[in-house]
Structure formats: structure tokens, C-alpha cells
Amino acid sequence: MASVVAVQRDPMFRSYYDKKVAQGLKYMNIIGHVTKKMTAVIFAILRDNKVYAPVLPDAS
């Protein structure tokens, strides 16, 4: 599943995953949230015709 690999390799999706873990969600529910976020990112890339450049969250 692409979402699992994204969580493992992409810092933006990893940060989102960690945020959902902190909220107490179960693993498959979190993966569903990551998939939805990934879909939104993909459609934004296609809509804006831009190259993917992840925005890293603040460390604070």
C-alpha cells in the first residue's frame, strides 16, 4: 500500500501519522487518514501542474 511506504519514507506523511497516533487512533484508521491526505496531495499536484515538494512541519 502506497500510504504505508509514504509513512516510512516521507517526513510530511510520517509527521501526520505520528499526530494521528498521538490522538489514539488505530493503525488501519490512521492509514486511511494518510491515504486521504495522499490523495489530496496528488490531486493538488495534478491541478496545479507542479512538482511534489513536501512541506516539512515545524518541530515545535
Image (tube, helix red, strand yellow):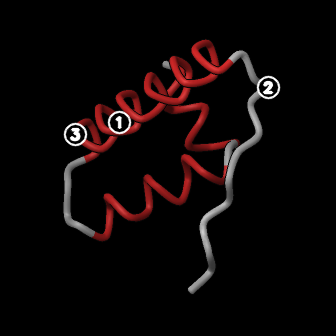
Measured in 3D between alpha carbons, the distance from the residue under mark 1 to the one under mark 3, in whole angstroms, is 5 Å
Q: Give neighbour class at mark 2: few <14, some 14-19, many 20+ (Cα, 10 Å).
A: few
The residue under label 2 is which amino acid type?
Val
- 10 Å crowding of disc 1: few (<14), some (14-19), many (20+): some
Circle on res. 51? 2
Residue 6, labelled with which disc? none
Tell me what residue is drawn at x 23 percent, y 67 percent.
23
Q: Please, what secondary structure does the residue beneath circle 3 have?
A: helix
Q: Which residue shows up at 22% across the image and 39% down it?
A: 29
Packing grade of label 3 (10 A; few <14, some 14-19, many >=20) is: few
First in sequence, mark 2 or 1: give its number.
Answer: 1
Q: Which residue is mark 1?
A: 31
Badge number at residue 29: 3
Q: Position of residue 42 (x, y in %)?
A: 56, 20
* Picture coordinates of residue 25, whole percent (x, y): 20, 55
Q: Secondary structure at mark 2?
A: loop
Q: Which quarter of the rendered picture does the C terminus lie within? A: bottom right
Q: Sequence order check: which comes first, mark 2 or mark 3?
A: 3
Height in image: 16 above or below 39? Answer: below
Number of residue marks: 3
Residues tagged 1 and 3 counted as in contact (Cβ below 8 A): yes
Q: Is residue 32 above or below residue 18?
A: above
Amino acid type at mark 3:
Asn
> Foreground: 9 or 57?
57
